[in-house]
Amino acid sequence: MANRTGGQILVDQLLIHGATDAFCVPGESYLAVLDALHDASMKVTICRAEGGACMMAEAAGKLTGKPGICFVTRGPGATNASPGIHIADQDSTPLILFVGQIDGSMREREAFQELDYRAVFGTMTKWATEIDDAARIPEIISRAFHVATSGRPGPVVIALPEDVLTDLADVADAEPYQVTEQHPAPAQMADLAKRFAAAKSPVAILGGSRWSPEAIADFQAFAERFDLPVAVSFRRQMLFPADHPNFAGDLGIGPNPKLLARIKESDLVLLVGGRLSEMPSQSYTLFGIPNPGRPLVHVHADPEELGRVYRPTLAINASPAGFCAALKTIEPPKAPAWKGAGAAAHEAYIAWSEQPAPVPGEFHPGEMVRWLRSQLPEDAILCNGAGNYATWVHRFHRFNKFATQLAPTCGSMGYGVPAAIGAKRLFPERTVIAFAGDGCFLMNGQDFATAVQYDLPVIVVVVDNGMYGTIRMHQEREYPGRVSATTLKNPDFAAYAKAFGGHGERVEKTSEFAPAFERAVKSGKPAIIHCLLDPEAITPAKSLSTIRAEAFAAQRKD
């Protein structure tokens, strides 16, 4: 082996482990890495802010199941990236963030932008470390890929001191990493079959990460054989085809009451891959803690998640792929007591997601989503951040293919635009749509420039109601009539798009959206469609005035 710089060794390891894309904001603290990337086959996407860069990498991890790769500089660069780390942590997404660090000879002097990255990121990562010897880079990068993808996937942060990146070392490369699948024991599958034989109203809930098209196909075949209603967790709608006759809907914010009733009345709940955290569990009210109150079979790739919140009747430590493959070994009861339940659950879902109710104003986001549903290709990728605007997307769009949804289960704002750019960079042939509220968009809207720079014709639908709508809704519910710190004055987002070199449209009526969208597609440019929403249209079911009136009525009763 010949001597290589630490920066070259690092880039060589990334290529060995199959990394194809890196997202970054450059910094002088890792110039040696940037130099090594100059001749590498890896695509490098230069971003306008570290938060957007890290979210792009997180989106790549969500779509591929492989660690997204992000590089940022030290101090403020690293802390700016922290929202992406938090998303990867709560969403169980494999991600590796590399942070430039001060020269090792300056440690603990509070040098320029110095931080202790183990301390800063230790509570929101699976592993946070710092490399202190160039010869150990292959070992540490190998471990990072294994940690990020094993058990419950998540983020890893690695600090890169400047001197380590310029030091020379003669060291062998690591072998490519492999993801270890966990499989259920035959006795556990036999136990599961017995529980189905004794059940009268079973239901399945799919969530989490580490899924694949093959695992979904295996579970789909199982659901068909068992006539099993299948629900998906919050913002995991791509885990089961919405048009499948056994699909029961999603456990998100404001879910179908009939789905909640079905789960509450079930005498066997099969939870695969998910954690059933605050949002899907309806603020931890759907099941008792620690005793769920009904038989619960929990399947998860990380043994630490089994029994962490809910005490399962049967705990199975297995990845979705390992468990779903094993489902072929069990047979349904000859005369299941729940015959016809799959079709009934799907009928209730279709009724819930078919016809949006009228809303105040001339622009109807539900009708917009329903139109898009009829126009978009099946493999289109839909992205969103956080805000009430997203409830129309989740309720009225039907995800039928794996790797078509990018949405933060942790509810982070500002995610939709960078996620869409990251997705389009990886899959330029696919249609990619980002939905954002007016508040959500401007948290990472500057990275629209990244889409323009790389000729990535994403379409961003900005739903503008002139306020932080979700917070305003909660404000009216808790403190009716006392509006404080939730009103926004917005720019012309169509003009914003044009200023960056993209395509811009303004939509004030529902009927204007379809032609505006078609013009945006035809332009071949990154586009923003600025949609004006009446502030009263706060949810698919209630207006802001209704929520305020209900809150006043409740206060009078008290």
Image (cartoon, rainbow, N blue to C red):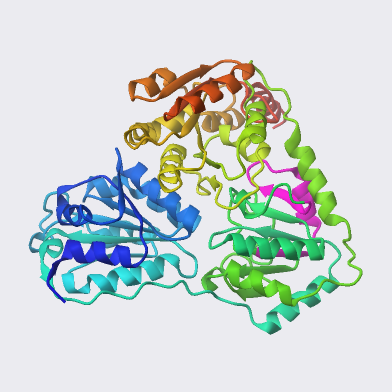
Percent position of residue 452, x then y: 35, 32
Of the 4 image quadrants, the one containing the C terminus is: top right
| Residue at 28% over, 71% down | 140
Is 540 placed above or below 75 here? above
Q: Is residue 293 visible?
A: no
Is 166 placed above or below 238 here? below
| Residue at 60% over, 59% down | 213
Q: What is the quadrant of residue 375 in the picture? A: top right
Of the 4 image quadrants, the one containing the N terminus is: bottom left
Percent position of residue 209, x then y: 54, 60
Q: Is residue 269 magenta?
A: yes
Residue nearest the viewer, comparing 44 with 286: 44
Is 371 placed above or below 325 here? above
Q: What is the quadrant of residue 127 in the picture? A: bottom left
Residue range highlighted in magenta: 245-271
| Residue at 83% over, 61% down | 201
Is 557 placed above or below 406 here? above
Left/right placement of residue 518 relative to residue 162 reads: right
Instruction: State the residue lying farthest toward the bottom.
Output: 187
Residue nearest the viewer, comparing 282 with 301: 301
Left/right placement of residue 483 relative to residue 47 reads: right
Residue nearest the viewer, comparing 85 with 69: 69
Q: Is residue 299 visible?
A: yes
